Image (spheres, helix red, strand yellow):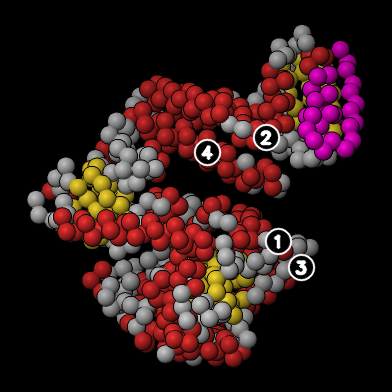
Amino acid sequence: MDEIAATSSAVLTNAIGLHARPSVKLTKLAKTFMADIEVASAAEGPWVDAKSIVKVMAVKATKGATLHFRARGPDAAEALAALRELVALGFSEEGVTETRARGSEDG
Amino acid sequence: MAELRLTGRQAAAGLAAGPIALLPSIEAMHRRRGSPEAEAAALRDAIAAALRQLGTLAEDAQDDGAGVLGFQIAMLEDDALSAPALDAIAAGTAADEAWQDAIAAQVADYESADDEHFRARASDLRDIGERVLRAVAGACDESAAPPGSIVFGEDLTPSRFLATDWSKGGGIALTRGSASGHVATLARARGVPMIVGIRADLTAIPRQAEALIDGEAGVLCLDPAPATRDSFLARVTAAKRRAAAAKDFRTRPAVTADGTPIAVLINVADPREVDNVDLAACDGIGLVRTEFLFHGRELPDEQTQYRAYRRLAEWASGKPVTIRTLDAGGDKPIPGLTIEGESNPFLGTRGIRLSLARPDPFRTQLRALARAAVHGAIEIMLPMVAAPRELAAARRYLDEGLQQLSEAGIAHRRPPLGMMVEVPAAAIAVERFDADFFSIGSNDLTQYVLAAARDLDSLAELSDPMDPAVLRLMARVAGHGAQTGRKVSLCGDAAGEPKHLAALLATGLRTLSVAPSALARTKEAIAGIELDRAAT
């Protein structure tokens, strides 16, 4: 991704982090968008394809980690908003104690 | 054809009767490798077949199961999972081998995670891996043994074992094979009787033969006479009844008929074995053989070992976990570590002797054990100790390791340091050894006391762990333990043999460690023993 259309981040608040079920939800949601979407557990990367569960699971992001997203494509902004919400709401799992989200969309 | 009795070595206990299914020769058993294009297509077809199976399962699954299957389906649908395998295939690797390597890498990655939730996913990856492997094997292997048959041949691959339906019974008889290999582990876990090392000319075996297999005795009987068959089937019925009765004993604490509690622990050769064991059914792990860590191309590093030991410690949740340091040499060579060309390896540089001769891997293992001891009741056990100075030298290496960990600020704890009693010198003069605990290795002790190699079938009668000389040495060690307040256990095969238990308890032993599959029958046998009578 040479040009970054949009970036966003959210803190993982669900009980067990970016684990099997949350990863299934995240990749399924990502696949509903045309944009190329990448995810990382640090702002500087390494970035992986958010549509690949094998790669998303390999991030091994645990509770309290901040997930960073970046996307490029026609529906990039929409994709990021949806993903940020999914993460911030704790993947609609039980045990959500706190939700925080912040985003910066630069076009 | 007249009845033919063939003998081999036990790899998995159990009885089975059924038609013989002769395996093709070893060369033909490996999948014939096609062109890279054909191999890639075989893998893609297998993945598609596995996905269809998972889809069917997911439809019937309840909530929790559906979640697990949903994850497996999502992983399998992801091209990133098969990409490394397809790359290897393009470079000339066979489909099954490429897939196994790709999954092994994924499993290793999950197992290396610090977070237990991620580590637990390794089992899903293994599941996915085996399902696809079965599909690869099934597609090319039209001669897969029919359910309920006694598979007979040179050797059996894990993928063929997995491709076979064992739910209808059946057994495995091999002229080669290994009692400590992957297939034997699978067979024991699945309760499939298995014999290895049978001396027979496979070309002379009739294809239509009927067979009886006794995994415990290591006997394969072909075309049995009616009387042989009847008495065998009666034993099968009795064994089934016994297993059903023993089941009730499995989760109860072991107590003799006159009320003496006996601690019954399990022996573990591969950490995966505990996945199928109910912790409540045992008093801990009495013997962890660490050789499994040393089967790879390189010696395992401290972190890899730490994770493996920690996993067992966490599983045991505070119950003791006795981990034996590397027991290589003898009949267990490790390339690049054990010394080759010794004229009598059983009397050679093995066990603690090898560890002291090659201290670097030993140091690494001791540090990993001290670190894992933070997470549970880990105890370190030294194999083949023959002289007190070996124990003292090992303690110095442990002290050194603890010092290094302290200096580096790494969390650790000093585990108790005990020893195996398997060399007669250690049993005869046990009071000379300042060990924190003792564990009798009955297999080696018997072999050394009677000077009868344990791998020689012709000497099987002589290598009897119930020989009075062996029992007297056991009693000596048990007595020393009772006198000095040190734990003494027995972790050899003798403990898993119900008919030996009365004599073993009569020596004063109160702690036994057996294979997980022997837990129920051991406890049941203990419940029938009157100690007063056993002592006479």
* Residue B221 % position (x, y): 20, 56
Tell me whether marks 3 and 1 sit on the same chain: yes
The 10 Å Cα crowd at callout 2, few under 14, some 14 to 19, many 20 or more, is many
Work out whether disc 1 and disc 2 sit on a shared chain.
no
Quarter holding the C terminus of chain B is bottom left
Discs 4 and 2 share one subunit: no
Helix, strand or loop at mark 2: helix
Chain name for mark 2: A
Do marks 2 and 3 both belong to one polypeptide chain? no
Quadrant of residue B136 in the image? top left
Mark 1, residue position: B375
Amino acid type, residue under disc 4 in the picture: Asp
Question: Does any portion of residue B535 appear in the rendered image?
Answer: yes
Q: Can I make out residue B90 in this image?
A: no
Alpha carbon separation for disc pair 3 and 4: 40 Å
From mark 4 to mark 2, how far is it between C-alphas? Answer: 15 Å
What amino acid type should be assigned to the residue bearing mark 1?
Answer: His
Q: Chain of mark 1?
A: B
Q: Which residue is identified by label 2? A: A20
Write the residue at 79% across / 14% down.
Answer: A76
Residue B161: say if magenta. Answer: no
The residue located at (65%, 66%) in the rendering is B319
* Looking at the image, residue B482 lies above or below residue B411: below
For residue A87: magenta?
A: yes
Q: Secondary structure at mark 1?
A: helix
Q: Which residues are magenta?
A: A81-107
The residue under label 2 is which amino acid type?
A: Ala
Q: Is residue B341 above or below residue B81?
A: below
Residue B279 located left or right of residue B412: left
Residue bearing the label numbered 4 = B127
Q: Which residue in the protein does label 3 denote?
A: B406
